[in-house]
């Protein structure tokens, strides 16, 4: 599910949400909705306001303005325990003196859940994260991945309507990160629970989220599916932050063509004539025998400045008329690749030539 069904209210609604710290506006008039059962990613660099937004949703930080609405109910002024939300923190936040079972049971005790029901729900939650045999252990006796599973089970054992995850994988190594992100997604889909996932890692967001809200400086830059965010970025910032891209200064002519040094290119986007930024993803550029001609294609011939073998990929730096293009090619046994100093002819689709108005920082 990617959004609320037509004609129905969203499960979670942020309406012009704001947060001020003194004179600093950390989150600015943020409006978005999350459908029931949807996993929304809040993505952006450090300091963009994504964790502040999550903490306001969960009631851990008061909003300076705007509204937070859950299933039609305004919860903006409610304390955390009355919002029906489970939260998974970056640092796990487990009680070190309690066993795993006691950590999970604590929230149920605060909600006056009877002992027999508490025990059943704790065991069910532990089985869900494959830790049924670890109930009597303490956090220090668990690995990082196991501690994160306990933190997830603790958030789910209260059976919340919304699950909030604040950079839950940042303390794990690469292999565990991938395993845990898939596990979180599987559990979220199995339960059909609405979830908001904060991360600065674009690969995580692309891999498991139904939609992604890209934030920058407290402002929502773009909201869309992973495909939309990656393939149709709304700004130079989004194109550069989500995925790798060559970034070059150019000029757009009145005809729509783009002049990049000696190259005259076809490009996508609605940037007006004048100074622009051209962005091309390295893996969309291919080696070829001759520069392509005709509508829909761009091409150029240059010289290889650097070649880096990365196992399944070959990374080439190709210099073309003063510009330098990073090119990524899949490797094949027996296939000859150009070496440094040799000529290389490139081609890429016009629609992969992203053209944006020149930013003030360019």
Image: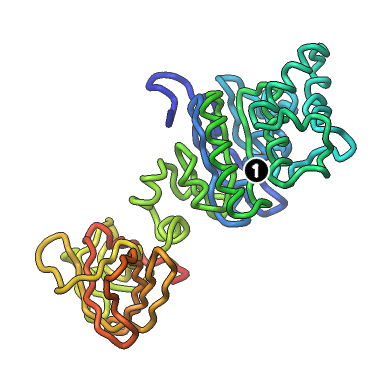
Q: Please identify the quadrant where the C terminus is shown.
A: bottom left
Locate residue 335: give its quadrant. Answer: bottom left
One can see residue 279 in this view: no
Residue lying at the far front in this picture: please name it.
334
Q: Position of residue 179 (x, y in %)?
A: 57, 44
Q: Is residue 245 left or right of residue 21?
A: left
Locate residue 330: give its quadrant. Answer: bottom left
Residue lying at the far left in this picture: please name it.
294
Q: Compared to 270, does 112 lie above or below?
A: above
Q: Nearer the viewer, residue 152 or 75?
A: 152
Which residue does the image show at 70% across and 24% down from the upper left? 157
Q: Which residue in the structure is indicated by mark 1?
A: 166
Which SS class for mark 1?
strand
Q: Is residue 97 left or right of residue 184?
A: right
Residue lying at the far right in this picture: please name it.
97
| Count of numbered labels shown in the rendering | 1
Q: Compared to 270, does 317 lie above or below?
A: below
Which residue does the image show at 83% across and 21% down from the upper left? 110
Q: Is residue 156 left or right of residue 115?
A: left
Q: Position of residue 350 (x, y in %)?
A: 21, 61
Locate residue 306: give its quadrant. Answer: bottom left
- According to the image, what is the colour scheme of the structure? rainbow
Q: Position of residue 225 (x, y in %)?
A: 40, 41
Which residue does the image show at 80% across and 11% down from the upper left? 116
Q: Compared to 4, does 62 lie above or below?
A: below
One can see residue 269 in this view: yes
Q: Position of residue 219 (x, y in %)?
A: 53, 49
Q: Please identify the quadrant where the N terminus is shown.
A: top left
Label 1 Cα neighbours within 10 Å, binned few <14 / some 14-19 / many ≥20 = many
Which residue does the image show at 72% across and 35% down from the upper left? 150
């Amino acid at each position: 599910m990617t959004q609320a069904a037509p004609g129905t209210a969203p499960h979670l609604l942020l309406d012009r949400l704001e947060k001020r710290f003194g004179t600093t506006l950390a989150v600015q008039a943020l409006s978005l909705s999350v459908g029931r059962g949807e996993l929304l990613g809040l993505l952006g660099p450090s300091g963009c306001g994504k964790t502040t937004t999550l903490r306001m949703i969960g009631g851990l930080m008061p909003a300076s303005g705007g509204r937070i609405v859950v299933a039609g109910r305004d919860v903006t002024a409610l304390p955390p325990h009355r919002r029906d939300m489970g939260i998974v923190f970056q640092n796990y936040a487990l009680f070190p003196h309690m066993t795993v079972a006691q950590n999970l049971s604590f929230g149920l005790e605060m909600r006056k859940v009877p002992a027999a029901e508490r025990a059943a729900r704790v065991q069910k939650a532990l089985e869900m994260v494959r830790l049924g045999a670890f109930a009597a252990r303490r956090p220090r006796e668990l690995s990082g991945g196991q501690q994160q599973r306990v933190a997830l089970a603790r958030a789910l054992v209260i059976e919340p309507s919304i699950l909030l995850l604040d950079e839950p994988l940042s303390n794990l190594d690469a292999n565990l990160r991938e395993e845990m992100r898939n596990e979180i997604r599987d559990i979220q889909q199995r339960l059909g629970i609405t979830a908001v996932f904060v991360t600065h890692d674009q690969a995580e967001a692309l891999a498991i989220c139904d939609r992604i809200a890209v934030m920058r400086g407290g402002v929502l830059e773009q909201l869309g599916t992973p495909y939309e965010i990656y393939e149709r970025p709304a700004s130079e910032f989004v194109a550069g932050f989500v995925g790798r891209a060559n970034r070059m200064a150019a000029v757009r002519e009145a005809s729509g063509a783009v002049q990049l040094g000696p190259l005259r290119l076809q490009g996508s986007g609605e940037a007006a004539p004048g100074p622009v930024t051209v962005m091309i993803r390295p893996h969309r550029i291919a080696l070829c025998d001759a520069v392509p001609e005709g509508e829909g294609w761009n091409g150029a011939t240059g010289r290889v400045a650097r070649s880096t073998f990365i196992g399944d990929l070959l990374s080439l730096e190709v210099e073309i008329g003063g510009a330098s293009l990073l090119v990524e090619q899949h490797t094949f046994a027996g296939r000859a690749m150009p070496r440094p100093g040799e000529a290389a002819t490139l081609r890429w689709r016009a629609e992969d030539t992203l053209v944006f108005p020149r930013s003030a920082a360019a």
